[in-house]
Image: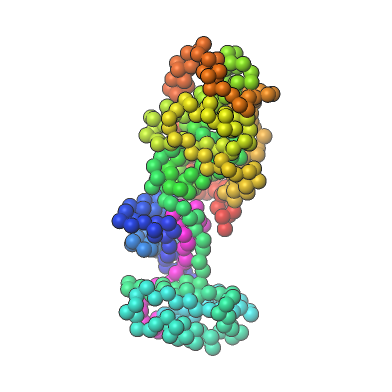
Amino acid sequence: MNYERILIRYGEISTKGRNRNQFVSKLKGNIVRLFKDMPNLHVQSTRDRMHILLNGENGEEVMKRLRTVFGIQSFSPVIKTTQSLEEIQLAALELMKKAYQEGCTFKVSVKRADKSFSYDTNELNHLVGGFILPKIEGLTVNVKQPDIKLHIEIRKEGVYLSNEVIEGAGGMPVGTSGKAMLMLSGGLDSPVAGYMTMKRGVELEAVHFHSPPFTSERAKEKVVELARQLSPFSGSIKLHIVPFTEIQQTIHAQVPENYTMTSTRRMMLMITDEIRKQQNGLAIVTGESLGQVASQTLDSMFAINDVTSTPIIRPLVTFDKTEIINIAQDIGTYETSILPYEDCCTIFTPPSPKTKPKKEKVEYYESFVDFATLISEAVKETETVTLSVKRNDVTENVLNDLL
């Protein structure tokens, strides 16, 4: 069967009041950008629903991509008819014939948004179910746990029929909650933090710290791939790659060994904050999980955060490693994250980093060096690339693990 359209149901957008249209408009824009390589496809939006008119485009590919769009509660490939009972019955029969397998049971579920429709919900259930049942041999009714649930939605502009409801990504449309900078390492945590932040409607740009020759080109390529794997959820992502070698070498020459991790994180945060200002961001996102490593204790966070008044978003702060791994596997970043190419933090980790560093001490150690100039140079020499999903070579996990 060639579906003519896909019906999109909103999630949290439906809870919005007077500003709902702004969220709908952003969601529509995100969807239009996602399908810019499908010129025949047309998106129609209303306050309550959105429709994608396929116009001959590949419906399966469209549905695969829609699974990555935040702001969608669910969607269904549908057939649209008029409010004619005969049209509804024939379309319902066509759908059931396509879905039926030997021994299947079914149920008709009617939602009557247009209360002026000629038949009430129970009447239409019986009229459609009674029309289908004798025409498909072996088909039986099961109203509690049917194998096939035929959905019929009666609206003023027409009737929509579907036997499939596909769960969406949920959350809010990316771009409705402002922009933030994601501190993206090559590990498991930061890509997951980025995903969860985008789910709340935040547009992200990523910042990565590269320290050649101590970190390899393969390590850099790994982070580029992680950013690309996050891009289906937002359309594209800017990645800022910061040259960090000179700053790290200076830290290790000037700061006592057990404080180098604290100072390193402070410098990273200051650089990220400078890039945030340039890009008009409103916050910084990290993959920190409380107590996971020495730099993620409350004492460390207090000493590190002191360099900025910018809000720091930590979506994983209460998560344990198993929970983070599970999400990484779901969104398709796990296999890339565990590739054995270390980032600058892991290579320069001291054997006994301070878990309760004192802010006053690290400030004293840093006072002997003009870090402000080094930071300014690093920001100036930052390389920026824009990454988007490769449509002909999509990392299968990114989409398929969401099925």
Q: Residue at x 53, y 15 (%)?
A: 364
Outermost residue toward the left in this view: 18
Identity of the residue drawn at 39% across and 30% down: 277
Residue 25 part of the magenta-drawn span: no
Q: Which is nearer the eye, 301 or 167?
A: 301
Q: Is residue 115 left or right of residue 6?
A: left
Residue 148 sits above or below residue 385 on the image: below
In the image, the segment drawn in magenta is: 61-87
Q: Residue at x 43, y 22 (%)?
A: 380
Q: Quadrant of the C terminus?
A: bottom right
Visible in this render: residue 40? no
Q: Is residue 66 magenta?
A: yes
The picture places residue 225, in percent across and down from the top left corner, at 56, 39
The structure's colour scheme is: rainbow
Task: Pinpoint residue 356: horizontal percent, then vertical percent.
Answer: 61, 26
Nearer to us in this view, 196 or 75: 196
Spot occupied by residue 242 in the image (x, y as percentages of width and height): 50, 26
Q: Is residue 148 left or right of residue 20?
A: right
Q: Is residue 395 above or below residue 15?
A: above
Q: Camera-side residue: 264 or 68?
A: 264
> Against 239, is 169 above or below?
below
**Looking at the image, which residue sits at the far right?**
351
Task: Name the side, left or right, on which 161 lies relative to 250.
Answer: left
Residue 350 is situated, as x and y percent measured from the top left of the image, at 66, 23
| In the image, farthest residue toward the top | 368
Tell me which residue sits at (48%, 76%) in the image. Answer: 109
Q: Tell me if residue 266 can be seen.
A: yes
Query: How many numbered marks, from 0 up?
Result: 0
